[in-house]
Amino acid sequence: MLPLIVQAATSILLASSLARAQIVEIGQTCNLARNRLTSTTHQFLSDCVPRAYCDPTTSTCKPRQCRGDEFPFKFPPDSPETPLPPFCGDGQFCPDEGDQCLPVVPPGQNCQINRDDECQPAPNAADIQGPWNHKGAICLRFTCFWQNQTVGQPCIVDNTVYTGYRGDGSEFATIISRDNCVAPSLFCDAQDNTCKQALDLGADCTSDKQCISRNCGTDNKCKLPAGTVIKIPLWQYIVTGVGIVAFIAIIFLSLFFMHKGQRAKTQREIREYFHEQTTYRSSIIALHTAARDRTSIYSASESRFSQYDEHGQMIYRDDDSQRQLLDNKRQSRLRQSVAMDDEEDSDEETAQGKRLLGGPGPSGMQSRESFSQSRLSLADDTPRGSFDYGHAGSSNAGGYAAVPLRQSMDQQPKGGNFKDPWGQ
């Protein structure tokens, strides 16, 4: 608990000192002796605000005259009140104070910490320049050097400690070691201060500068440089593509067979349904056929009761309960056939028949009796179950009503004028 309190107090004091050191506005008095570097980040600080520098001649804060960064600290972009200071030209540099542009210094001259751009470029800058130097020049221990030392040559090491902070507020130290050996293939061994060959990937290491990748992992093995683009081999692309295609094919085939089974099941259910409906329909048709056959048998074997009327004529009575079971369509057919037979008779026979039927008295009665006997003989000769059918328009299942042949005969008027049921 106590270390945390001490750490918090130290941070507060540091922040307050920084605030006091950079509160002097432009035009106010400043102390040149207070120009310094922070112990944690090695940042340059003065009494003036970041937009100004302390003029050593007047000890007052004045606006910056140059800049070395694209976006300098505390300068709002596109602000007419605080315009950005200009860059320095070729062969010049802008110091940390920002008071004026100065010419680059040759090797062996003083420079500010980590300000490699203040040093004069190396003659073979195209061969040795890189992210570890500025055009082949490097600032080590506040002195300019060229980073061109080869294997076995003496070298200079500059170790700078930077303080970092973790997420929980605790501090950790990071050491940045720089040298003037040709990078990244060489590094300066601090034990004998000579340049040695850098280690390949996977080799044991103790610091980043020992690896040719400039990245020593937490397992003390040389790793790939941070931010390196990983190149995937071609075979991995092929395997991945084949796997994706196979996965899609498996899903497609699974869905296909699943839907095929569902379709087969649905078709089987539909087929069973229609087979069941067809069976029901066949059963109903069989029942109707059996009922119709039984009705025909009952109608053909109808009960007939005979008696004589007052004139001695035999009369047949049909069972009324069986009459409507026959179809009137057959009656119309029989009537049509008899009418056609009568049309073939000669006019004389037709006239004679009418005289026999129409005359009153005993002779007429005898003639009617004879005619009735002949018609009855014709009816008796008709096979059982033969009926005259005519379309009745009733609501029965067949749409026809059956009427026995003798029914039309019994319905004729007695005496006088006899009406032929066959239309004669």
Image (spheres, rainbow, N blue to C red):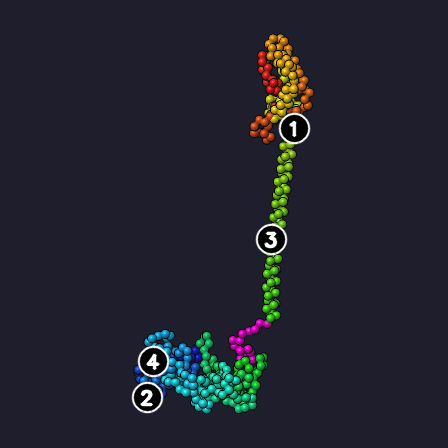
Give the alpha-carbon distance from disc 2 to disc 1, as whole Å: 140 Å
Give the alpha-carbon distance from disc 4 to disc 2, as whole Å: 20 Å
- Earlier residue among tags 4 and 3: 4
Q: Which residue is mark 4?
A: 23
Examine the residues drawn in magenta and state their main secondary structure: loop
- Earlier residue among tags 2 and 1: 2
Q: Residue at x 43, y 86 (%)?
A: 91
Residue 309 relative to residue 54: left or right: right
Front one among 97 and 136: 136
- Earlier residue among tags 1 and 4: 4
Foreground disc of the pair 4, 2: 2
Q: Are marks 1 and 4 in contact (CB under 8 Å)?
A: no
- Earlier residue among tags 4 and 2: 4
> In the rendering, which numbered label is found on residue 57?
2
Amino acid type for the residue under numbered disc 2: Thr
Q: Residue at x 46, y 90 (%)?
A: 107
